[in-house]
Amino acid sequence: MKIDNGKISASQFMFAVACFIQASTLLTAFFISVTKQDSWIVSIFGFLIGMIFLWIYTALMKNFPNKNLVEINDLVFGPVIGKIFSFIYIYFFLTLSALNLKDMGDFVGIAIMPDTPTIVILVSFMCICAWAVRGGIEIVTRYSLFFTFTTSFIIIVTFFLAFNDIDFNNFLPIFNQPFMKYLQGTHIISTIPFGEIVVFLMVTPNIEIPKNKIGKYFTLGFAIGGISLILIILRDIAVLGNVITLFTFPSFETLRMIRLSSTLGRMEVLFAVILITLMFFKISFLYYVSVLVISQIFKLNSHKNIVIGVGIIIIIYSTNLYYSMIQHMEHGSNITPFQWLIYEFLLPLITLTVAKIRKISSSEEGN
Amino acid sequence: MLYVIIIFLIISFIDLPNLIKKDSKKELIVVCSILCFGFILSSLYALGIDLPSPLVGIENFLKNILKLGYKDQ
Amino acid sequence: MVFRYISRKIVSAQNRNKVNHDAILENGGLAISKNLEENLDFIKSAIGESQDLKIHEFAFGEHNQFSGALVYIDGLVNTIQITESILKPIVSNRKKYKSLEELTISEIRRSILCSGSVTESNLFSQILDGCLSGSTVMLLDGFSKGLIINTEMWEKRDVTEPQTETVIRGPREGFTENLRTNTTLLRRRIKSPKLRMDHMTIGHKTATNVCIAYIEGVARPEIIELLRTRLDSIDVDAVLDSGYIEEYIEESPFSIFSTVGYSEKPDVIASKILEGRIAIISDGSPFVLTVPMLFIESFQTAEDYYVRAFYASITRLMRIFCFFIAVFVVPIFIALSTYHQELIPTTLLFTVATAREGTPFPALFEALVLVISFEILREAGLRLPRAVGQAMSIVGALIVGDAAVSAGLVGAPMVIVVAITAVAGFIIPSQTDSISMLRIIMMILAAFLGGFGIAIGFLGMLVQLATMTSFGVPYFGAVMFSRDQQDSFIRMPLWIMEKRPKNIVYKDKQRKEVIIPPVKSDENVKQKGQDNFDE
């Protein structure tokens, strides 16, 4: 049963995935503080593990064409347990939205406007996101292509502009740290930026391509986003080196050091603007997926009515999550990867295996 | 606190008349309950009362009871 | 209590919609009688004792035994045609009729009258409609039908260069207020038999003739249907200008951007019709509406297609850039000087700081004062008589601005910034109203939230553009890389654009068969010419 009847094309989907991952540049601080100058190795491994997650999601999508996550849960586990699984996902999506909103609020509060109370920033931002979510999936992903291209362009341009400050000695020493750190770093990066694409399982019915090709577009978008993220990490390590652990926002500091000439010195404005735009996309998408899950569970007619209510819950939730940024960093590096692993890896894997065992697939249902 | 009440009144005046006209009971219940939940949360925020965070709760559960988690270094 | 009050309001609002319209006349279905005197009395009571209602009674037949009357409104008719082609043939007809039974209305219409475009009617509503539109009505004693003969002629404006859209290179004809002239101008440009002109009448008291023009097979049927339903549902007294129609058929009445385009030049309208759009020509207005309209069309002018592709692309990019300047420069300046002073280059910072020190008001207030006074000057310049207008602009722009800076009311950088936005806003004439509104919204956002406010405002504008549709076609679809990009931010050469825009057209997608670049001069030809010359 489709609640939102919007249709997105294959390329829109692909660039939505890419944009979603590119928006996670704010989250690089979690694993950079752990593995320091070897973060690029960790990110490549994380990318490969993310491909495993991708494979699970694509298998689910292929097995149940035209059904989103809640419907898959209902089909595989039956109505009662399926609803319990979907409730767990409500919690996960709401937490993701609140976390990203909090990240953005912190970034704006620290870097751009230190004097404004955070709640004002959050409320005004969520107003625009609520407007976009009311329009449905088409509006939310409409500009994904534009954002992806602009971000990639800016990444490449800043890469060349930072050439002056790159010192390849910053990559040394390599492979110096205990093995546990590498494991931890890979774990963090595969769950926090890369694993969040589980949200795309909710919008499968709206994509207009033959279902056997969806894996190709998903993988392509993931590759574009992943490569952008790896490039950013490379650039940051090359410019900043070992002191990268001091900063909450490494990319911001990198751009601060770029000087085009004596007058045009402040390139981080560009970063701030593009980051706000990307976070708008990511938060709107997560917001939209939360609203969709809730309206799908309760079988509402349209998702538009609960948009404002869910928005208010997300705003208050984001102020409530952690009592300081230090706790945020500490939990993000140590415990959150395990919790995310449950929602991103364990639950879909269980769903897939149960579906295979019970030999349930959507094409046999005749629905 | 007053602002919270005013804002919620405005929101309900925007959204609810449409729903009442269409007379769909289930939607009305769900929307009203979500709005009430949001109202309670924002009133608590406006009054300054801090609620425990569910995320931190689950993470502490994972860390202490199931002993999953990387050690801080 | 409150509930009852609200429900009472709703009920009274619903009842207000069931107003009795007085139609052009009551008893619209009344048939004419056989008695001539009764008919004339009825017409006189319906139209009244106006001095321009002329009733000319005549007698014809062998012994002048039959009587009849011509009814027309002076000023709307061609009196020469009445005398020559209507009265003369009837009165001087020498055929012998013995009685009324031999002479029928259809015989009069087909064999005796010399004029074309004659209809028979027996309803008073049609007769009065025809009379008020410039036709002559012939009523005969003893016949239950009357003849309506088209004899329109009235004073109309010549076809001149349009005031609002001037071009350097390109045709200079513009539409006039006469429907027939406008349709002629279109027909002269599109000589295809598939050009359809559907006619309808809108407005109870004005009975404005409205014509819908499209090319069958190229325009989408569902858009045509939608347009027709919307036009049919317009239930008003008066339609004086196509702007009235635009407000009734547009989709998002509260949005800042307009979803119905207009133009005053026939070549622009003809090219839009050829791309699959539908034109709405309204009698009494030289502005012709086109439907659906996309956002990118406000940056396209007719001249883009008559100059060469490279320069046209540059001017179009400049126009889009100026749109952003006009909307965002003042808010960026306010945000920079209030919140993010560290972003201003150091040498400029000194001048801005000294200017801000000397003025008592916050930056938003200064900017609002300047922007609003600019709008006042612009509006006053439109309404002033020609002779005083020049002096007013010089006074307003130079002296008042300079004096305000010297008096310390506003700072000099702010005046320059507002002047730049004002001039940049004029580049796109069709969007000046939306630019002004957007600018003020962005200024307020920037004053409260700084750079973040501008980012939010920009995203809000993007979301607004994404949610709008114009008759089912997405308003801002040119952002994705598709074939429509050939004509959006830049203009590709005409020989590349081989297909019509995807969203608007229906079946006939090909403008031409294949992409053929212009032919290079043949090498052999040059050689041959060379040889001949040498010999």
Image: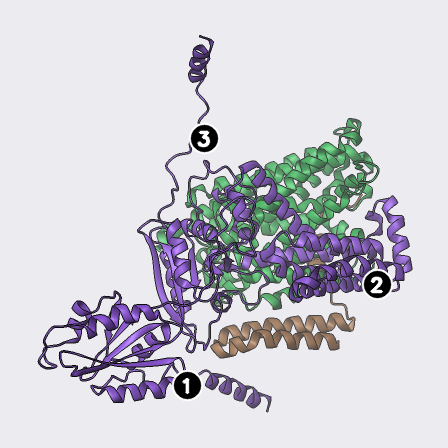
Chain colours: A green, B brown, C purple
Q: Amino acid at mark 3?
A: Pro
- How far apart marks 1 and 3 lie (CA) works out to 63 Å
Q: Amino acid at mark 2?
A: Pro
Q: Nearer the viewer, residue C445 or A322?
A: C445
Q: Would you name the residue on which mark 2 appears? A: C362
The picture places residue C45, in percent across and down from the top left corner, at 35, 88
User: Does residue A363 appear left or right of residue C484 in this picture?
Assistant: left
Mark 3 or mark 2, earlier in chain: 2
Numbered disc 2: secondary structure: loop
Q: What kind of element bears circle 1?
A: loop
Q: Is residue A76 above or below residue C168?
A: below
Question: Is A329 situated left or right of A145 in this image?
Answer: right
Judged left or right of residue C6, residue C452 is right
Q: Earlier in the sequence, mark 1 or mark 3?
A: 1
Answer yes or no: do the residues labelled 1 and 3 have beta carbons within 8 Å? no
Q: Give the quadrant of the C terminus of chain C.
A: top left
Residue under pointer 3: C517
Q: Which mark is residue C437?
A: none
> Which comes before the other along the chain, label 2 or label 1?
1
Residue at image point 38% right, 70% down: C201
Q: Which residue is mark 1?
A: C20
Q: Is residue C20 above or below residue C353?
A: below
Q: Find residue A2 and report its horizontal and vertical position in percent.
A: 45, 60
Between tags 2 and 1, which lies in front? 1
Quarter of the N terminus of chain C within the rendering: bottom right
Q: Note whether residue A5 is visible.
A: no
Tell me the distance, in whole angstroms, between the alpha carbons under discs 3 and 2: 58 Å
Badge 1: chain ID: C
Q: Is residue A106 left or right of residue C54?
A: right
User: In the image, residue C138 lies at what x, y percent?
Assistant: 26, 77
